[in-house]
Amino acid sequence: MQTAAQEMAYICEIAAYPTSEAKTKASDADLILLGPQVRFSMEKIKAQCPGVQVAAIDMRLYGKMDGKAVIEFAKQKLGD
């Protein structure tokens, strides 16, 4: 995703953390993207980070490691 964002000249900060750290690491994020393997924790993450959008990355995009498509998905969620 980082490489895709750079290639697209999309300025953003991307970081990966375990879901157990969402409250402390992502409570000020604009968007939290969950991998398909942890999408079951979406409601818990939303409760821990009120006011932050939370979405799950599509399993096909994740599996293909399609960073550009995931960035486009994030931009859509953010209204960019």
Image (cartoon, grey):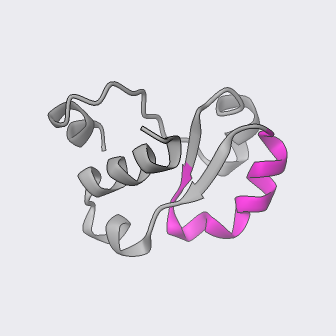
Query: Viewer-proximal residue, 6 or 78?
Result: 78
Rendering coords of residue 38 (x, y %)? 61, 65
Task: Name which residue lies at 27% across and 61% down.
Answer: 65
Looking at the rendered image, the quarter that the N terminus falls into is top left
Quick check: 35 above or below 3? below
Image quadrant assignment for residue 24 = top right
Quick check: 6 above or below 20? above
Rendering coords of residue 44 (x, y %)? 80, 56
Tag count in the figure?
Answer: 0
Please give left or right for residue 60 compared with residue 35 in the image: left
Task: Name which residue lies at 37% across and 65% down.
Answer: 62
Q: Is residue 37 magenta?
A: yes
**Residue furthest to the front:** 79
Please give left or right for residue 21 compared with residue 38 in the image: right
**Start and end of the magenta stretch?**
33-50
Task: Name which residue lies at 21% across and 31% down.
Answer: 6
Please give left or right for residue 50 compared with residue 55 in the image: right
Looking at the rendered image, the quarter that the C terminus falls into is top left
**Residue furthest to the right:** 47
* Helix, strand or loop: magenta stretch: helix
